């Protein structure tokens, strides 16, 4: 009985511990609109860092892009410095992009 | 003890006696030495003091120097930092003032060669028939101004006047019943010496084996304020050696198609005419409304050259939020759009647009209250997904108070104006575009569109076109207003190779009652998407392998292609009158020349900057 109870407690503790490790999966989301000031493609082509100038604060914000569709647009210049972008990203330290597209219009 | 002891004692006494003397002598010497040492010590102390003084002085100097260095060091970075900040400020100001920060300029030039050949059906040219009748009766009267000849000429004039006053289907029937003899008499003017031109046109093969044209377009985009921009496109399109549209409208003879009778409001710059620069597009857009992905855009709209015509035109593979599906609309509308793009992760790129455009402005109402109504179009576009691999579109649009003729100058029929509203037309459409990478060495683009047109005619008929209604009737043979439903589809592929060669094939089909609104389509014979029959097109694009300079999308390329039109029915791109099966046409009275089939070989050299 005591053994079972201690096992149960241990499992509960482990479970709670693992839950704390997964907190990062629900990182805060950032949103912004602003023109691209710089694009840096990684040498392997699997990621890129785009610096956007926040239209509200005027501050530069670096966003890491890893999805292939957006990377394709960066590579063939369909998105280039000067283009206004609406971005959503995870505030995970690298500002990993969730959505990166030109502002809609026309 | 004696002796020895005594000796020792004596020595000791002597030494004792001498010792003070020696000691006295040493002491003096010692004192001297001590004095000397003391003097030396004093000197050393003085020197030490002096040295201490020097050290202190040096320390003070060092401290002063250090402070000076500090002061200098403190002053130097301030000066550099200030200079740097000043420089940054100047750079920011220059960047702000530079045109590139707010103005984008681009455009394209195109040279095009066309070879055009077709096969017509035998028909009776209505316009020539009336011209013959008028000319003959006038000639008779001037040759012999008799009562009979005057009466005949007056009767024709009265006939024309009364004909123009007919507005409705019932009115048309009444007119025809009352003027039966005149109608019969008209057939006698198929030929007349007065004009030497027969209204009866046997089947023939029209051909133009060398049509050269220039087209120029200039694109401007200005960021006026945050979230507000103005976009414009200026264009010019003319054939070599001409400042009018005669080369494509079959000048001097009955035009082949209603959308190539002449240029009008929404086709100027898209059908070759003059070298005058035309404002094809100009609209202001307010984006990011309420910090949402919402926009309002008003002006002369980007409603020409929409998807999927971008593939054969070799423009951007994905058209973005602008434009209209080319199967439904290809016309430079003046209008407004309200758009919204929600952030839906499962539907990337989704957006919706509500659009309005004016097709015809009729001005002030007349005193009788029988005013012609403005022709307007409204539409709703839904794009649930818009990504490189897949783009899907859905659209509904309605044309209201459709006119019977646009305002045109110097056409085969003279100057034309709208004289009646014929009813409304609804359009429904859906389509997709996909991009498949790494299909062999290249990329495969595929598209598919389907559409439906549903006419809603009113009771009006067009007197200037022989009492034909909205997709109803024939010349002088009116049909009761009846809703007609037509369908169409368009399929195509384009294979892009790393060598910058692109090979495309397209096929579109339209049913008997299919009608679209695409008179500005980039086709010489007629807008191929409006064909009541089949059109097959194959093309090869070869881009020059050159580094872009003026912009990242700049390029130059050759394009060679062929179109083959097979018409099943008459009246492609014409909503006035009912279509007739092409094989059944044999001398019928028609306003346009019926084509059975046509071919267009073309070659272009195009530069986009």
Image (tube, coloured by chain):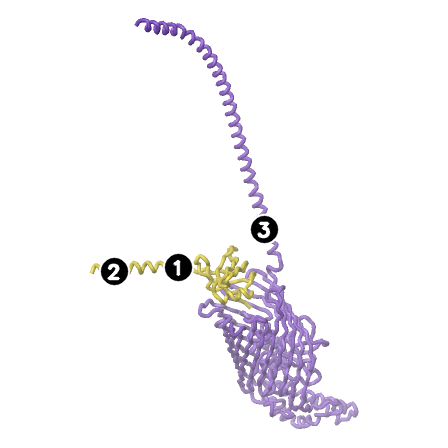
Mark 3 crowdedness (10 Å alpha carbons): few <14, some 14-19, many ≥20? few
Residue at the right extreme, as displayed: B143
> What distance separates the C-alpha of mark 3 from that of mark 1?
40 Å
> What distance separates the C-alpha of mark 1 from that of mark 2?
28 Å
Chain letter of mark 3 equals B
Where residue B514 appears, x then y in whole percent?
Answer: 56, 84
> What distance separates the C-alpha of mark 2 from that of mark 3?
67 Å
Where disc 1 sits, the SS reads helix
| Residue that mark 1 sits on | A24
Q: Which chain is yellow?
A: A
Where residue B389 appears, x then y in whole percent?
Answer: 50, 72
Along the line of sight, which residue is nearer the eye, B571 or B74? B74
Where residue A25 appears, x then y in whole percent?
Answer: 39, 61
Q: Which chain is purple?
A: B
Disc 2 with disc 3 on a shared chain: no
- Please tell me whether mark 1 or mark 2 is closer to you in this view: 2
- Please tell me which of labels 1 and 2 falls first in the chain: 2
Label drawn at residue B310 = none
| Residue that mark 2 sits on | A7
| Residue that mark 3 sits on | B89
């Amino acid at each position: 009985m005591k053994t079972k109870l201690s096992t149960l407690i241990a499992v509960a503790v482990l479970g709670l511990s693992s839950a704390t490790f997964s907190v990062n999966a629900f990182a805060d989301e950032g949103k912004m609109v602003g023109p691209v000031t710089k694009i840096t493609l990684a040498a392997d082509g699997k990621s890129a860092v785009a610096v956007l100038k926040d239209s509200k604060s005027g501050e530069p914000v670096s966003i890491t892009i890893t999805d292939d569709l957006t990377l394709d647009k960066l590579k063939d210049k369909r998105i280039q410095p000067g283009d206004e972008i609406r971005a959503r990203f995870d505030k995970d330290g690298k500002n990993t992009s969730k959505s990166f597209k030109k502002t809609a219009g026309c | 003890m004696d002796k020895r002891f005594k000796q020792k004692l004596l020595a000791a006494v002597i030494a004792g006696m001498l010792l003070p003397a020696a000691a006295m002598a040493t002491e003096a010497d010692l004192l001297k030495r001590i004095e000397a040492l003391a003097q030396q010590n004093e000197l050393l102390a003085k020197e030490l003091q002096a040295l201490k003084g020097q050290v202190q002085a040096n320390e003070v100097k060092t401290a002063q120097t250090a402070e000076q260095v500090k002061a200098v060091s403190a002053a130097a970075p301030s000066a550099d930092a200030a200079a740097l900040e000043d420089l940054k400020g100047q750079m920011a100001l220059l960047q702000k003032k530079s045109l590139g920060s707010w103005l984008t300029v681009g455009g394209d030039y195109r040279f095009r060669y066309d070879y055009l050949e077709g096969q017509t059906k035998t028909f009776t040219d209505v316009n020539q028939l009336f011209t013959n009748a008028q000319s003959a009766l006038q000639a008779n009267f001037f040759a012999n101004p008799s009562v009979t000849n005057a009466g005949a000429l007056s009767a024709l004039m009265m006939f024309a006047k009364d004909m123009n006053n007919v507005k409705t289907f019932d009115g048309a029937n009444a007119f025809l019943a009352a003027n039966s003899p005149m109608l019969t008499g008209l057939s006698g003017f198929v030929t007349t010496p007065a004009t030497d031109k027969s209204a009866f046109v046997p089947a023939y093969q029209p051909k133009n084996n060398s049509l050269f044209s220039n087209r120029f377009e200039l694109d401007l985009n200005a960021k006026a304020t945050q979230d507000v921009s103005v976009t414009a496109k200026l264009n010019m399109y003319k054939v070599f050696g001409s400042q009018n549209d005669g080369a494509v409208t079959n000048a001097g003879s009955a035009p082949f198609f209603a959308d190539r009778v002449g240029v009008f409001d929404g086709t100027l710059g898209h059908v070759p005419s003059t070298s005058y620069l035309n404002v094809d597009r100009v609209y202001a857009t307010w984006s990011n409304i309420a910090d949402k992905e919402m926009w309002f855009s008003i002006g002369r709209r980007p409603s020409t050259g929409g998807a999927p015509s971008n593939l054969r035109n070799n423009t951007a593979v994905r058209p973005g939020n602008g434009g209209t599906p080319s199967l439904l609309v290809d016309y430079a509308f003046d209008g407004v759009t309200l758009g919204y793009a929600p952030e839906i992760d499962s539907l990337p790129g989704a957006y919706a647009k509500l659009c309005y455009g004016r097709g015809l402005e009729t001005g002030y109402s007349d005193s009788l209250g029988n005013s012609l109504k403005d022709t307007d179009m409204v539409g709703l576009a839904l794009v649930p997904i818009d990504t490189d691999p897949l783009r899907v579109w859905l659209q509904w649009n309605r044309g209201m108070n459709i006119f019977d003729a646009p305002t045109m100058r110097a056409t085969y029929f003279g100057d034309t104006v709208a004289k009646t509203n014929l009813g409304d037309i609804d359009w429904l459409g859906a389509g997709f575009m996909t991009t498949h990478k790494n299909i062999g060495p290249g990329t495969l683009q595929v598209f598919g569109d389907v559409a439906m047109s549903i006419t809603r005619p009113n009771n009006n008929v067009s007197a200037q076109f022989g009492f034909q209604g909205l997709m109803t009737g024939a010349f002088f043979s009116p049909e009761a207003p009846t809703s007609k439903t037509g369908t169409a589809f368009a399929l195509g592929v384009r294979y892009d190779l790393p060598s910058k060669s692109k090979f495309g094939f397209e096929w579109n089909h339209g049913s008997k009652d299919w009608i679209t609104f695409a008179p500005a389509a980039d086709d010489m014979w007629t807008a191929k998407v409006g064909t009541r029959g089949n059109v097959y097109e194959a093309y090869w694009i070869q881009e020059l392998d050159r580094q872009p300079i003026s912009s990242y999308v700049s390029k130059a390329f050759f394009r060679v292609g062929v179109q083959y039109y097979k018409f099943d029915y008459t009246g492609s791109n014409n909503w006035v009158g009912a279509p007739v099966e092409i094989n059944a046409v044999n001398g019928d009275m028609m306003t346009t020349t019926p084509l059975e089939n046509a071919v267009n070989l073309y070659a272009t050299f195009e530069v986009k900057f």
